Image (cartoon, rainbow, N blue to C red):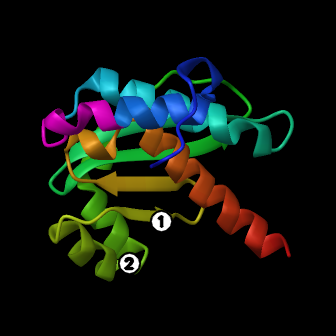
Amino acid sequence: MIDQKPEDELDYYDIKKIEHKKLKGKWNCAVTEEDIRKYCTEFIDTFQSFVKEGYVLNSEWAVSESGIVVRFSASKEVKPLHYNRDLETINELMKELGREHKIEELLKGRKVKFYDKSGSLYFCKPNKLKNWTEFMAIKDSNKCLWKLIGKLK
């Protein structure tokens, strides 16, 4: 038997994990702007304390030929989440950066993460709700943080 915590003892991570699992029946539904907004807010909240003091993490998004694209970048001014048409041609950007192999990953329905020359972080994932929940934002930001910490060692 699995030992489960009573509901009043669940931490924030556990609550988001449960919410993610409750969406299982809707996992293949298309993502809405509200879903992207929640994902980005959660990612930024998780990651922000690791951003250089005086800077904030901002996000922008678009629907591309390969799925949904979100870009996170640090700046000194807060910019609200907005749709950026330039991100619609993410495959062009990946070619410019010499990451053609990433395009193949997207075409196979896989998630892709990469940085550009300015240090902006890109997530490209299929347009399915399971990829863009708040729980996935926590997981994605934690993976990025672990990689960052690993480079510091």
Q: Is residue 42 above or below residue 136?
A: above
Question: Mark 2: which amino acid?
Answer: Arg
User: Which residue is more in the foreground, 67 or 18?
Assistant: 18
Q: Give percent across and percent down for residue 16.
A: 48, 31
The image quadrant that residue 28 belongs to is top left
The furthest residue to the front? 1
- Considering the numbered disc 2 on the image, is that residue within a helix, a strand or a loop? loop
- Mark 2, Cα crowd under 10 Å, few <14 / some 14-19 / many 20+, is some
Q: Which mark is residue 99?
A: 2
Number of callouts: 2
Is residue 91 toward the left or the right of residue 135 in the image? left
Give the dominant element type of the magenta stretch: helix, strand or loop.
helix
Q: Which mark is residue 51?
A: none
The image quadrant that residue 61 belongs to is top left
Seen at 66% across and 67% down, the residue is: 147
Mark 2 and mark 1 in contact? Answer it, CB < 8 Å: yes
Of badges 2 and 1, nearer the viewer stands 1
Q: CA distance from mark 2 to mark 1?
A: 9 Å
Quadrant of the drawing holding the C terminus: bottom right
Question: Mark 1: which amino acid?
Answer: Phe
- What's the magenta region? 21-30
Q: Which residue is mark 1?
A: 114
Q: Give percent across and percent down for residue 37.
A: 40, 25
Is residue 150 toward the left or the right of residue 10 in the image? right
Is residue 86 toward the left or the right of residue 77 in the image? left
* Residue 90 inside the magenta-drawn segment: no
Seen at 18% across and 64% down, the residue is: 109
Q: Is residue 102 above or below residue 6?
A: below
Q: Is residue 142 visible?
A: yes
